[in-house]
Image (cartoon, helix red, strand yellow):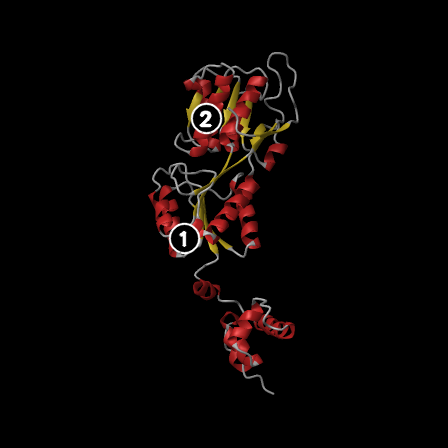
Amino acid sequence: MADPIGPRRSAKKSSQVTMDDIAQRLRVSKVTVSKALRGHPDISAETTAKIKKLARKWGYIPNYPARNLASNHSKTIGVIVPKIAHYFFSPVIEAMYDVAFENGYELILTVSQESVQREQKHVETLLSMRVDGIIVSVTQETRDGSIFQRAKQRGVPLTFMDRVMDDEGFNKIVADDFGGAFTATEQAIRVGCRTIAHLSGNRYLSIARNRLAGYKAALKKHEIPVSEDRILFSGLSDDDGYAGFQSLYESKRMPECIFCVTYPVALGVCRAARERGMRIPEDIDIITFGSSTLNRFQSPSMSYIEQPTTELGRKALELTIDTIRTTNDFVPQTITLPTRLVLRDTCVRSRQHGQKAGVGLTKKVGMQA
């Protein structure tokens, strides 16, 4: 018997094969094809196998937009991050993709490049694409949250991750920035440092504010005066760390230790220190918030506060999906994940006695007062 569909199909692209084509070829209803492709128990195993075999043979591709439109869900979640090729955001994004795949969602990834204008444009684009939810890590310059309120007004769940806005009514997933900074600063004090500078990020950025607060709290606990001229606000990049070190050096008020707001900032400090002929940690000690797999290959390897990158990504996706599924009963949540102190080659040697203090220590950090 001649194949009534085959000849017609040969003139089509495989992406144009429809459920109607498959239904006509196998002389079943379109509903049967739809259910079989979704593994519905109403369809017998024999029929399901035939339908799936023909679908594979003909290169059938489901029309997800049409299917999702009928169910009033796009099964997509938009993600906006400041950077993509970054020590912190790369593992976060990978974790998000894992959770999305596990739950039958697709991610639409956008990158603001630290631009407020791009961030606003991305939110508008994602809303126009009818995403089911949005996850945002804001730029260093974001002040106005009205664009995020627009998502809220449209009933699209929005979760802030890592870098958050103070606005109420949104989910927030953050690391314990205060506790981690407190512990990092206290470690420097523990090894005998009494003058500790802090290279901070933009003073309006949530992570920078909280890490600065943790730094100051540790100094206060140990009755060490806070020297405002040793707190430098700039950015979160290698160049910011380099410029911050140069500023400290030229002020002739070099500290015994520098606590860096991010790992890239710490790399900039190391570069500047070497150019000045200063040895780390002998001449200037350093400890940083965040790290990278590259740190293990660096000499000296820097002690750092480890961020729960994978868990941040997973929790952000899981909470967003939970919110999508329970929109009518939505109660915004703020989840703070613990950080860990990891000691390597810096900030471990007593500056008074030349003895190491706790090399190789990994310490879980909670909120501290």
Q: Residue at x 40, y 38 (%)?
A: 165
Residue 185 left/right relative to 47: left
At label 2, counting other C-alpha atoms closer than 10 Å, the crowd grade (few under 14, some 14-19, many 20 or more) is: many
Task: Pinpoint residue 240: horizontal percent, then vertical percent.
Answer: 45, 30
Visible residue check, residue 271: no
Q: Residue at x 42, y 44 (%)?
A: 112
- Residue 212 is labelled as 2
> How many numbered callouts?
2
Q: Sequence-wise, which precedes: disc 2 or disc 1?
A: 1
Quadrant in the picture for the N terminus = bottom right
Which element is circle 2 on? helix
Which amino acid does the dot numbered 1 rest on? Answer: Leu
Q: Are marks 2 and 1 in contact (CB under 8 Å)?
A: no
From the image, tell me which residue sits under label 1: 126
Residue 355 left/right relative to 305: right
Which amino acid does the dot numbered 2 rest on? Answer: Leu
Residue 115 left/right relative to 258: left
- Toward the viewer: 100 or 14? 100
- Toward the viewer: 205 or 258? 205
- Residue 367 is labelled as none
Corner quadrant of residue 232? top left
Task: Pinpoint residue 8: horizontal percent, then vertical percent.
Answer: 51, 81
In the displayed image of the protein, which residue is found farthest to the front? 329
